[in-house]
Amino acid sequence: MLNLMLYGVLPYLAIGSFFCVSVVRYLKMPFTFSSLSTQFLESKQLFWGSVPFHIGILTLFAGHLVGFMFPRAVMAWNGMPVRLLILETTAMIAAFLALVGLTALIVRRAGSARLRANTTVMDVLVYVTLLMAIGTGLWVALAMRWGSAWYTHTLVPYLWSVFKLNPDVQLMVDMKLPAQLHVISAFLLIGVFSFTRLVHAFVAPLPYLWRPPQQVIWNRARRQPQAHD
Amino acid sequence: MDVRSQVAMVFHLDKCIGCHTCSIACKNVWTDRKGAEYMWWNNVETKPGTGYPTRWEDQQQYKGGWERDGKLIKLRAVDKVRGAVTVFHNPALPTIDDYYEPFTYTYEELFTAAEGADQPVAKPISMITGKPMNIEAGPNWDDDLGGSPVYAANDPNLEALTPEERQQMFDVEKLVFFYVPRICNHCANPSCVASCPSGALYKRGEDGIVLLNQERCRAWRFCVSACPYKKTYFNWSTGKSEKCILCYPRLESGQAPACFHSCVGRIRYLGILLYDADKILDAVNVPDSELVDAQRRMILDPFDPEVIAAAKERGIGDDVISAAQRSPVYKFVMEWKLALPLHAEHRTLPMLFYVPPMLPVQAKVGDYGYDTSVEGFLGSIDQARLPLKYMAKLFGAGNEAPVRYALRKQLAVRHHRRALQACDITPEQAQALLTEADCDVEQADAIHRLTAIAAFEDRFVIPPMHREEAIELLDEDTLAAKGSTGIGFREGPARGP
C-alpha cells in the first residue's frame, strides 16, 4: 500500500501540481511568478552559492532529462568505458557543485539578519527538498556506481510507465534504498516546485536572445505613414 | 521621418535651493512602502559630492549606460552573451549598502519606557531587520558639503580637474556647491529597457514615459545595473524593480507630476518635444564631444510644416503639436540652447535637461577678495569658482563649449536685466554682452520671463493624453472601466514574510 502511494500516486500528485498550479499561478498571480532575489541585500557570498548551484543543478537536470528521453543514445554513448567515465565524472562534478552551492546559499541565508528577515517558510521548504534530492542523488552515485549505465534500463522504464499512466510500482520496489529515496525526493521537489520561488525556471529569459533592444508600447493603434505617389 | 512625441523636462539649477520638497512629495506619494523605503525616485544631490547611490557616476564600478561599438552601440553592463552567464549573479548590481539601510526610530519607547532616572530615548532601528542599528548613511548624507573630505572630494567628476584646481574648490574661504535634483530621465534610448531580459520595461509610445510592468518583471535586476543614473531600484521585499513613473496618472488628468507641482523654487518645466526616432542611432554613435549637438539634431522643430505633416501622419494629435509649440522645454533646449542633458556620454539620450547653474560662477580674483567693479560685476565664466571643466563633465559630456554658451547667455541676460532695473550697468554694456552671447533683447526678456516670473501654465504645458481613446481601443466594455483608476492591479504586493 505504501509502495503504491509512493510510486503510484505521489508521482501523479507531483506532476499534476507541477503543471496545473504553475499555469494557474502564471495566469492568476503573475506578480509572484519569479524568484525573490536577495542579491540586493547580500552580494558577495551569493556569488559562491548561486553560480555553482545553478551550473550544477542545470547540468544534472539536463543529464537526467537526456537519460529519460533518449535512453538508447545514452547506452550507446556508454558503450566505451572512457566515455562512461567522462559522463560519470561530469555528473559527479555537477552534483558536488550543486551541493556546495546549495550549502553556501543556506549558510549565507542563515548567517545574515537581513536575509533571515526576508525568508519565508516556502524558502525553507525549497532548501529542504533540494537538499534531499541532491543528497540522495549523491548517495546513489556513491553507493550504486555507474548510475548512467543502469539508470537507462531500470529507472527509465519506471518513469515511462508513469507517463504512460500505467505505473509499474514493482520496478521501484525492487530498487535499492538510495534510489528509492532519490525518486521519492525528486517527486516531492516536483510537487512543491510550482508553489515556491523555483517557478523562475519557467520564465528563464530566453526570448531576450532574439528580441530587439528597445521596446515601445502604444496605448492606441499607431498610424503608419500613408504611401505617397 | 518617424516623429514621436516625448514628455520632456527642464530643471533650472540656478533656481534650485536644495530644499528637498520634491523628494518628500514623491516619497509620500509613491515610495512610502515596505521594500521601497530606501528608494528616492526623486532625490536632490549636492555637487561636488558622491550622490545617491554613492558614486553612482563611476561607471567603472556600476557599468551603466551604452558605449560605442563600431557602427552600433552596446550596453556596458550586459549583453545577450554575457547575460547568460551573469544571470545567476549580477556582478554590477549595487547593494543596499551603496544606497543606505532604511531606518526608523523606536518612538513607542518614549511612551512605554519604565520610570527611571534617565530620559527615555527613541533608538534607531533598521527597517529591514527591525533590529537596532547605527545610522551610517542616508539619501542626502553629504548634503551641503557635509563630510566633504569623504564625499565631495570623491566626486567622480573631479577627475577632469588638476590636483591644484581640486584644492582650490575646497579652500575654506572659497567653498562652492550647487544642487542637482534627479529623477528618471525617461531617455529616448533607455539602457534599462534594452537590458531587461523579461521585456518588462518599455517606453510608452504616446508620451515616451519609461515604465516597468510589475507583473512581467522577474527580478533579473539588469535594469538596475544598466541605468547609468541608477534610477531603477530593486524592491527587496516584493522582488521587483521599480522606477519613477513621471506621475503618469497625474499627467493623464492634466496635473503636473508631484515633484514638479511641489517645487518651491519653481525650477521645473515640463512640455512636449517632438523627435525623429529614425535619428536615434545618429544621435548616439558620435564622439563624446558631439553628443549634445547630435541630440539636439534629433529633436524636431514643431513649427516646421514638414514636421507637422509627418507628425499628423503618425497620428500625433493637433493638441499635442500645439503643446509642442508652446513647450517651455523646446525653448530652453532648442531655441535658447540653455538646457543640457546630464552625463550625455552614456548615450541614453536623456529627456531631462538641466540649465547649468550660474550663481556659483562668481569669479575668484586674487587672494584678497572679489572684483566688484562694473566690468567684472558678476564675474567671468573662465575664472569661475566651479571650474568650467567640472561643469562640462556633468552637462557637456566633457565638451566645454555648450556649457560655456549656456552660462554666457545667462550672464548676459542677468546684465541686461540689471541695466534695466538697477541701472548700474549701461544699456550699451548690456547690449554688448548680449550680442557676444548670441542673444538679443527680445530673447533675453523671454528667458527672464520664463525663468523668473513664469506662471504654472507657462512652466507645465501638458497635452491631453486622450486616456478615453486608450480605454476604448482596449478590447473590452468601456463601461467596465468606469470608476477604475486605470493603474495597478488588485492583488496585494506582498511577497516576503
Image (tube, rainbow, N blue to C red):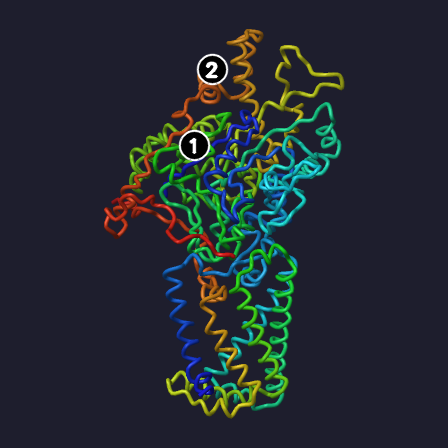
Tell me what residue is drawn at x 61 percent, y 80 percent: A138
Q: Residues within 10 Å of mark 2 (few under 14, many from 20)?
A: some
Q: Is residue A203 above or below residue B278?
A: below
Q: Give the mark, 1 or 2, whose residue is nearer the N terminus.
A: 1
Q: Position of residue B408 (x, y in %)?
A: 57, 22
Q: Position of residue A9 (x, y in %)?
A: 42, 82
Horizontal side of A58 relative to B475 (left or right) equals right
**SS for tag 2?**
helix
Which residue is disc 1 drawn over? B270
Kind of residue at disc 2: Val
Q: Is residue B34 above or below residue A31?
A: above
For residue B441, the mark is 2
Visible in this render: residue A224?
no
Kind of residue at disc 1: Leu
How many tags in the picture?
A: 2
Q: Position of residue A17 (x, y in %)?
A: 41, 72
Tell me what residue is drawn at x 26 percent, y 52 percent: B475
Q: Position of residue B43 (x, y in %)?
A: 55, 37
